[in-house]
Amino acid sequence: MSKHVLTNGRIYTATGKFHEENAAFNRCMVVAGDKITFVGDTDDALVRKAIEDGASVTDLDNRVVVPGIIEAHTHLLLFGTWLMKLDISHCKSLEEIQSSVLEYAKAHPDLPRLLCRGWYQHTTNGRAFATDLDGIDPRPIYIESEDLHSTWCNTAAAKELPIHRLGKEDSPTTVARDVDGNPTGLFAEVAQFHVVWHHQIVSMSQEDKFRALDTVFELYVNSGYTGAIDLAMDEIMWDTLVKYREQKGIPIHVGSHWLVTNGCSRDELLNRVDQVIEMYETWHPSRNPEFCVLGIKLILDGVVDGCTAAVSNPFPGHTSLVPPVWDTEELTLVIQRATDAGMQVAIHAVGDVVITQAIDAIEQAGAGGKRHRMEHIEFPAAEDIRRMGELGIIASIQPGHCDPFAVRTYAQMVGPQLWERAFPYKKFLDGQAVLAIGTDAPSASHLPMPTVYTATTRRSARVPTMTAQTHADQALTLSQAMYAFTAGAAYARHAETWTGSLAAGMRADFVIIDTEWDAEVLLEAKIAQTWSKGKQIFKT
Ligand SMILES: [Zn+2]
């Protein structure tokens, strides 16, 4: 069995509490095989014995060691395909977008379709017509919004999309249509997830899908991650991961929440849940916690940028409120069904209206204390934060989404009252909720240190020269953020007994970081090494 002694470091060991204010550090750690066997002082007898037994010795040179980071919310294959798309986020007008796509089309005559990303709706004044793209190239053109919740298509793309997958979900908010009922180019929310992404993934070759996963896993390993939870799984993506794992192996542990959409009959809805239950039985976490199905994902509303979040004020220029995607009764039914099968439920809820709805449904389903989780939770009422703690609902947050650059228009969009309570990370902890940090890549950067920087300073990692802070009083301490990104995320997938903290008996999943333990300098922090199961899987 291979033995390693890592000495002279700052080994972060704030374990046992989810609300630890101060980090505790040890100097030395011993790893034997795939486990940590000791964390403590360098002059301990156990350390001397390990060295006598021939352990390799690494001088950490005072570098920081934290548990392997666990990405609590990502989209693996979608992130990989996103990386392959043309980035137009620098474009400031329709003309700039058109010329970027044209240049890309000319440079890539072999591509069957032109996939782009990074469209900010305001650069075209919210305008997204197929006709504005039709003159560029005859191939299907897809332009995904920066917030990922919508895609603007040309006519060729609109024609090839399997819109029939929508049924009752085909509405003016999901598929924009003209007076004759023909799609005009914009596909949003469930049409984005269920039609556009589905079609893009189905149209990709296995080779391209594998290439996308190669890139994603490499990026994750190089960034200090030893685990990830995918938050919008479906059969095609899972099948790709299964094949990839068989042929190439996956270097980090992966758990998945399967997207269940509504808009169908009650029977069909329950049937959709039952299909996931079947997958859960086959890929049960108890059988192989490293590659498993954890539960379902439900999307109750959209996002602020697309004016689709279910907030209690109408968006500027809108006269009516955004209705919740689900009704509470069907939501309760689905949560109950999933909970009875032993699965976890992850609920996308951005606006205050659906945050309350989700908590009501969990309560009515008698599903408190089952580690159900809420995603994003951007504008919760104080009372709802208290109820989350009471019901043991995990607050799954993505600090990149509260980057001052990303939210610069939010106060105006949601109004001062809701803005006042936006992204209340500290209040979640005060309310006794377990915090789990993720990035929601590709909707925000997958990089952990910039994510922790924004969580702890509430400043922009995207535009570091910006001085604005997003409600500075809601900043987490560095220890709280690191805890949420490791032990908290492990808790969110029932894995805290074997990973997410550094202690004897835990799996040797850890990352060595070249940094001071100081939130202010995290943008300069360098991931030096990543270890998974006692093996070094990345080194700078
Ligand atoms: Zn997501």
Image (cartoon, grey):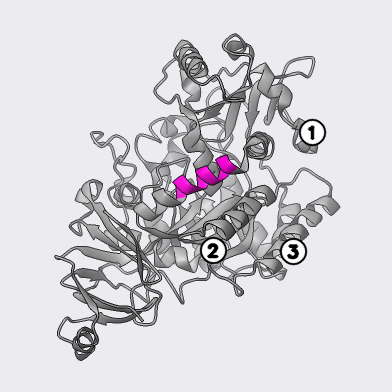
Which residues make up the magenta segment?
207-216
Indicate left or right for 208 with 64 as reference: right
Q: Is residue 372 left or right of residue 480?
A: right
Residue 153 appears at what percent x and percent y?
Answer: 62, 22
Q: Is residue 131 visible?
A: yes
For the point 39% across and 82% down, the residue is 505
> Which image quarter: residue 215?
top left
Near mark 1 (Cα within 10 A), the count class, few <14, some 14-19 or many ≥20, is few
Label 2, residues with CA under 10 Å away: few <14, some 14-19, many ≥20:
many
Q: Are marks 2 and 3 in contact (CB under 8 Å)?
A: no
The first of marks 1 and 3 along the sequence is 1
The Cα–Cα distance between marks 1 and 3, rounded to whole angstroms, is: 25 Å
Q: Position of residue 494 (x, y in %)?
A: 53, 70
Report if residue 298 lies within the magenta region. Answer: no
Q: Is 210 one of the magenta-colored residues?
A: yes
Point out residue 167 in the picture as x, y percentages from the top left corner: 80, 37
Mark 3 falls on what kind of element? helix
Pointer 3 residue:
278
Going by the numbered disc 2, the residue's amino acid type is Ile
Q: Is mark 3 within 8 Å of ligand 1?
A: no
Looking at the rendered structure, the kind of residue marked 1 is His
Q: Residues within 10 Å of mark 3 (few under 14, many from 20)?
A: few
Q: Secondary structure at mark 2?
A: loop
- Please report the residue visible at 25 percent of the width from the left and 68 percent of the height from the top: 22
Q: Position of residue 256 (x, y in %)?
A: 58, 58
Q: Residue at x 26, y 34 (%)?
A: 466
Of circles 2 and 3, the one toward us is 3
Q: Which residue is mark 1?
A: 164
**Prevailing SS of the magenta stretch:** helix
Q: Look at label 3 and name its amino acid.
A: Glu
* Residue 75 appears in the figure: no
Write down the residue under mark 2: 393
